[in-house]
Amino acid sequence: MTVIEAIRARRTIGKMAGELPRETIRELIELATLAPNHRMTEPWRFTVITGTARERLGRFWAERAGASIDAAARDAFVEGESKKPLRAPTLIIVSTRTDPNPEIAEEDFAATAAAVQNLMIAAQSKGIHTGWKTGKMVHDPEVKKFLGLDPSDRIVGTIYMGTQALDEAKTRPRKLDDVITWMSDAEASIR
C-alpha cells in the first residue's frame, strides 16, 4: 500500500478487535516520532493501554465524568461510560509536554498532532484499524495524574487500535472548493 493509498483508505472505526503485538506498537510509535518538529523538542508522549488496564481506565474516567450527575442517573452513566475503552484492544494516549513559552507550546502541540497522523497512516498501511477520540476527559487533571502525566501536559487524543473492524467505516464527500483559496496573478491579489 502506498502512502497515498493509506491516506485515502484510512477511516475512523468505532469498535475493533484483534490484539497488536508489542513490537508492532513500538514500530508505529517510532514512525509517529518521525513527524516534523520545528525546534526538535520531541514533546510527544505515548501511554499504551491494553488488557485489564483498559477496564481500570474506563472505570476511573467514568467515575470522574459522572461525579456531578444526579445519583439516580449516575450508575447507568458510569456503566456505559466505563465501557468506552473496551471498544478496541489497544489504546494509545498521545500527549504533549507544554513548554512555558506559548509559541513553542503551540508548535509542540501541532507536532504531536502530526505524530498522531503518522501513527494512524502507518497503522492503515499495515491493515490496522484506528479511531482518534478526545472528549472532556483529556482536560481532567486527575486523568492526567492517573496516567502518570505532568499536570501541564496536554492530551492530544486517545487512539483506539485493532486488527479487525467490528463496525463499518463511515465515509463522507470532501468539498475541496469550500476549503481552498487560490492566490495567484490570475485568481486574486494579496492586499
Image (spheres, rainbow, N blue to C red):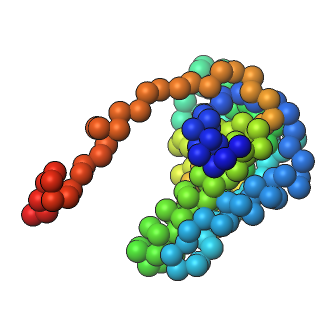
The residue lying toward the viewer, choosing from 110 and 80, is 110
The residue lying toward the viewer, choosing from 8 and 163, is 8
Quadrant placement of the C terminus: bottom left
Q: Quadrant of residue 72?
A: top right
Residue at 68% across, 24% down: 80
Residue 123 in picture, x, y percent from top left: 72, 46
> In the displayed structure, does residue 94 sit left or right of residue 83?
left
> In the displayed structure, does residue 142 sit left or right of residue 83?
left
Residue 86 in picture, x, y percent from top left: 77, 32
Quadrant placement of the N terminus: top right
Q: Quadrant of residue 94?
A: bottom right
User: Does residue 78 show up?
Assistant: no
Residue at 15% across, 59% down: 185
> In the displayed structure, does residue 56 sit left or right of residue 96?
right
Residue 6 in picture, x, y percent from top left: 64, 42
The residue lying toward the viewer, choosing from 151 and 91, is 91
* Residue with the most extreme front position: 186
User: Up-down: is 6 above or below 28?
Assistant: above
Residue at 67% across, 47% down: 2
User: Does residue 113 show up?
Assistant: yes
Residue 151 in picture, x, y percent from top left: 59, 65
